[in-house]
Image (cartoon, rainbow, N blue to C red):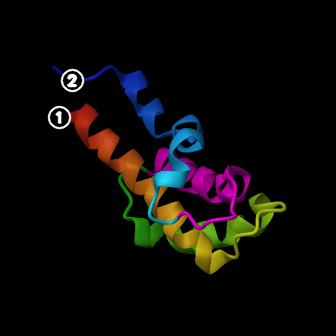
Amino acid sequence: MNPPVHSRNRGGLAYWALHYQEASFHRPGLRFSDYAPALYLGISGFVALPDSPFEFLLPKLSLRYPSVRGVSALPWKSAIPVIWSAWERMSRIDRQIRH
């Protein structure tokens, strides 16, 4: 039995707000608000183009990052693994839903 479509929400910002400190990208001293813009890009990038490989989206996301970064302490290079984590989680959830 497939999980309901709303299960995709398990990969959203609410999930990350609770679990970012457990993620491999987390660094002491950084708050959720530092990660939120990068997480948002990973999630929204997947939602916009779910069948595109991450490598295809990354250049587009790099252009968007300055406009969503706000006061985040994460420079672009540090944001990439955060974006990847959010994108990959959404991809995993989507595969579970489809199968």
Residue 19 lies, in percent from the top left, at: 50, 45
Residue lying at 84% horizontally and 62% vertically, measured from the top left: 71
Distance between the Cα atoms at labels 2 and 1?
Answer: 7 Å
The N terminus, quarter of image: top left
Q: Which mark is residue 99?
A: 1
Label 2, secondary structure: give it: loop
| Mark 1, other Cα within 10 Å: few <14 / some 14–19 / many ≥20 | few
Residue 76 higher or lower than 82, as above or below: below
Residue lying at 47% horizontally and 31% vertically, measured from the top left: 9
Q: Residue farthest to the bottom?
A: 77
Q: Which residues are magenta?
A: 26-49
Which residue does the numbered mark 2 point to in the structure image?
Answer: 2
Amino acid type, label 1: His
Q: Are marks 2 and 1 in contact (CB under 8 Å)?
A: yes
Residue lying at 44% horizontally and 64% vertically, measured from the top left: 24
Q: Quadrant of residue 13?
A: top right
Q: Is residue 29 on the magenta stretch?
A: yes
Residue 11 higher or lower than 87, as above or below: above
Viewer-nearest residue: 67 or 69: 69
Q: Which mark is first along the chain, 1 or 2?
A: 2
In the rendered view, does 93 fall on the left or right side of 32? left
Amino acid type, label 2: Asn
The C terminus, quarter of image: top left
Label 1, secondary structure: give it: loop
Q: Quadrant of residue 76?
A: bottom right
Residue 14 lies, in percent from the top left, at: 58, 35
